Amino acid sequence: MKISIVTPAAARSRNGNRNTATRWAGFLRELGHKVEVEQQWSGGPADVMIALHARRSHPSIRAYSESFSGRPLVVVLTGTDLYRDIRSDPDAQRSLSLATHLVVLQELGAMELPTRFRSKTRTIYQSARAAATASPLTGCFEVVVSGHLREEKDPFRTAAAVALLPPESRIRVTHMGGALTPAMAAEARGWMEREPRYRWLGELPRWRALRVLARSRLMVISSRMEGGANVVCEAIASRVPVIASRVRGNVGMLGPHYPGYYPLADERALARLLARAERDRAYYSALARACAARAKLVTPDRERDSLERLLADACATSQRVRKPSRQRAAA
């Protein structure tokens, strides 16, 4: 089949949506399909559209639905879709209706949708390959934060937490991710000036970011909203324990009983967990075991097989919908 994947993220972006689109395109080509990744649908013929982001990709979703009514139209819901836009944005809401299938990226995502849409919703965990093994830095207990500097990520919560740690703590924070505004870049530089245990590296090539992740002892994901973070998959695959804000997108990734949650935007609680992970070997081991238990969810084979089942289901549904109309036309 010819498949159009639409993502609002630019081709050279290291945005999570672009990473997902690129990875899925690779899987679908392995399965024998012809795939084109576009920021906006060009209008060319396609047997299937897969659109990431209900709100930002809505013009493409609407245009494809009007041009190829009844063909499979899969909408992949991001964190801002699930936890903000579908509640108030007309374009995002309309995309839910136009989609023949919806995809969420973690097990709690479907609970955010109106009940009438849940029967056409599938859960596909994103995958990651384990980064090459790297030895931890010996001079410190390195904690990594990986994500663009944007409000939804609550990007400086870990910097605020490390500032609360006692002087004898060996924790050092390495923050990777581009600043989406000059104000965010200025704030990151301000934190580095005030807190020598925090270092912002900016946006790194993917290979280098994975190397830093692999050598780290812990990753923090502090997001206010997440659809199913790529960086959590990467940490799980690389056996790097995670401390996460207790928001539904993170709980859907790590499970309801995961021992490494702190209340959103609470740097004091985060600081306590960081200090505990540094000092308490049993607690650190519990985090590592809990992450390892989720590793089977984020394998490339599982993600590829889930995509294959989604396409088969979407095409079968499309044929059932289109068949009666052909019969009526023949009559």
Image (cartoon, helix red, strand yellow):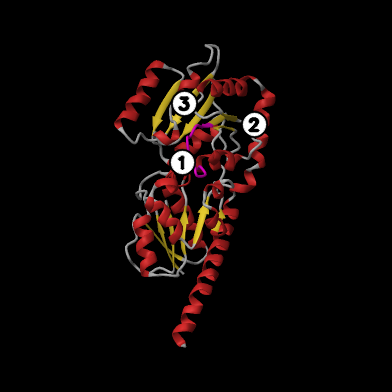
Give the percent coordinates (x, y) of residue 290: 66, 36
Q: Position of residue 161 (x, y in %)?
A: 50, 21
100 w.r.t. 151: above or below: below
Q: Amino acid at mark 1?
A: Trp
Find out whether residue 237 is within the magenta segment: no
Q: Which mark is residue 259?
A: 2
Residue 191 location, quadrant: top left
Mark 3 or 1, closer to the camera? 3
| Mark nearer the N terminus (3 vs 1) | 3
Q: What kind of residue is marked 2?
A: Pro
Main secondary structure along the magenta-highlighted residues:
loop
Q: CA distance from mark 3 to mark 2?
A: 19 Å
Residue annotated with mark 1: 207
Residue range corresponding to the magenta coloring: 220-229
How many numbered circles does the render carry? 3
> Which amino acid lies under the numbered mark 3 shown in the image of this protein?
Arg
Give SS at disc 1: helix
**Front residue of this view, candidates 138 and 165:** 165
